[in-house]
Image (tube, rainbow, N blue to C red):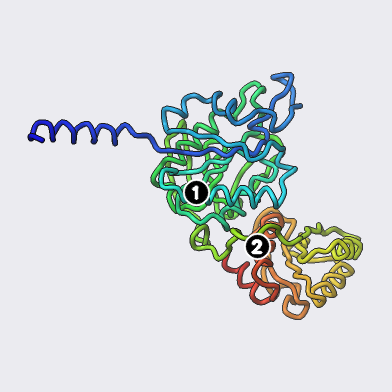
Amino acid sequence: MNAWKKTAVLALMSASVLMAKPQVTILATGGTIAGSGESSVKSSYSAGAVTVDKLLAAVPAINDLATIKGEQISSIGSQEMTGKVWLKLAKRVNELLAQKETEAVIITHGTDTMEETAFFLNLTVKSQKPVVLVGAMRSGSSMSADGPMNLYNAVNVAINKASTNKGVVIVMNDEIHAAREATKLNTTAVNAFASPNTGKIGTVYYGKVEYFTQSVRPHTLASEFDISKIEELPRVDILYAHPDDTDVLVNAALQAGAKGIIHAGMGNGNPFPLTQNALEKAAKSGVVVARSSRVGSGSTTQEAEVDDKKLGFVATESLNPQKARVLLMLALTKTSDREAIQKIFSTY
């Protein structure tokens, strides 16, 4: 091959590389972002009614950004989310990200339990590649639906090189939140998600991505949890504290076979006295009892008003009850030792 032909071939190869778009797989689980209703000005709709192909077709601009593939994992409202779907989802994400050609995975998800799914994936995905959860507060049939722009922004976050090794993130309302920190704080508003203890880690405005910080807790490849051979997660129940509380729900959880109990206590995770006695008995019987708080931010600290070591409890630190449940479920796949589980909560 002469020099001219060699130069031409190299030029064509370079152009091909420049024109190649990143490959992104979007896994659809349902939710409001895939919801549809009869009226554009009424709040009623059916979650998960729109299939992934129609969802992607509604945002054609994402095809200019990446080569998009879509898969339907489930078609549910996220209030129907289960541990089985979490395991299916995590295993599929790991399969996809192990493929060299897949550069990122996006998960469309209902907002009711998005924070739990994101945190579960944050602890079980084994890749530094971007994983982005995205949803909507208004269904696709609503006037000023927020889903299309959220999805467009999610693709931009997914293909951005700065998103590598950030752990799992949630993209909603032009904001990027770390999976560990994000929570839903409003039932209906488009700015429903926030990270009360740390703040958002970045923004994405009409596709322009900017990061300010990132989560410092272990995630993805640095996480010790492996669900590759797990078919079912241990049962963990959440009990919500209140004045005049009783031992009834503690006993019901035990009778139902709970391996762990998250107690969403008052203030700094404080139980009502009668409930505390029942929880102490549960802990001494081998059930892992973890104190969290019904307060929306802050940390449930060890050895405050409650003597955790004496009673056999674990303190969940800055995780809210629903995320503490996720971590305890995974911790119980490894150990039921109180001190070991306390160390896990202090780590993650």
Task: Tell me the quarter of the picture where residue 318 sits.
Answer: bottom right
Q: Up-down: is 70 above or below 347?
A: above
Q: According to the image, label 1 marks what residue? A: 201
Q: Nearer the viewer, residue 84 or 4?
A: 4
Location of residue 309 in the rendering, given as x and y in whole percent from the top left corner: 72, 79
Location of residue 229 in the rendering, given as x and y in whole percent from the top left corner: 62, 60
Q: Residue, x 12% and y 31% (percent of image)?
A: 5
Q: Residue, x 67% and y 72% (percent of image)?
A: 335
Left or right: where does residue 321 sit relative to residue 229? right
Q: Residue, x 53% and y 29% (percent of image)?
A: 149
Q: Up-down: is 324 above or below 277?
A: above
Label 1, secondary structure: give it: loop
Task: Tell me the quarter of the picture where residue 8 sits.
Answer: top left
Q: Residue, x 61% and y 23% (percent of image)?
A: 144
* Mark 1 burial class by Cα count in 10 Å: few <14, some 14-19, many 20+: some
Task: Tell me the quarter of the picture where residue 230 sits.
Answer: bottom right
- Looking at the rendered image, the quarter that the C terminus falls into is bottom right
Tag of residue 296: none
Label 2, secondary structure: give it: helix
- Looking at the rendered image, the quarter that the N terminus falls into is top left
Q: According to the image, label 2 marks what residue? A: 330
Residue 245 visible somewhere in the drawing: no
Q: Earlier in the sequence, mark 2 or mark 1?
A: 1
* Type of amino acid at the residue the image marks with label 2: Leu
* Mark 2 burial class by Cα count in 10 Å: few <14, some 14-19, many 20+: many
Front position among marks 2 and 1: 2
Location of residue 60 in the rendering, given as x and y in whole percent from the top left corner: 49, 24
Location of residue 302 in the rendering, given as x and y in whole percent from the top left corner: 68, 72
Count of picture labels: 2
* Type of amino acid at the residue the image marks with label 1: Ile
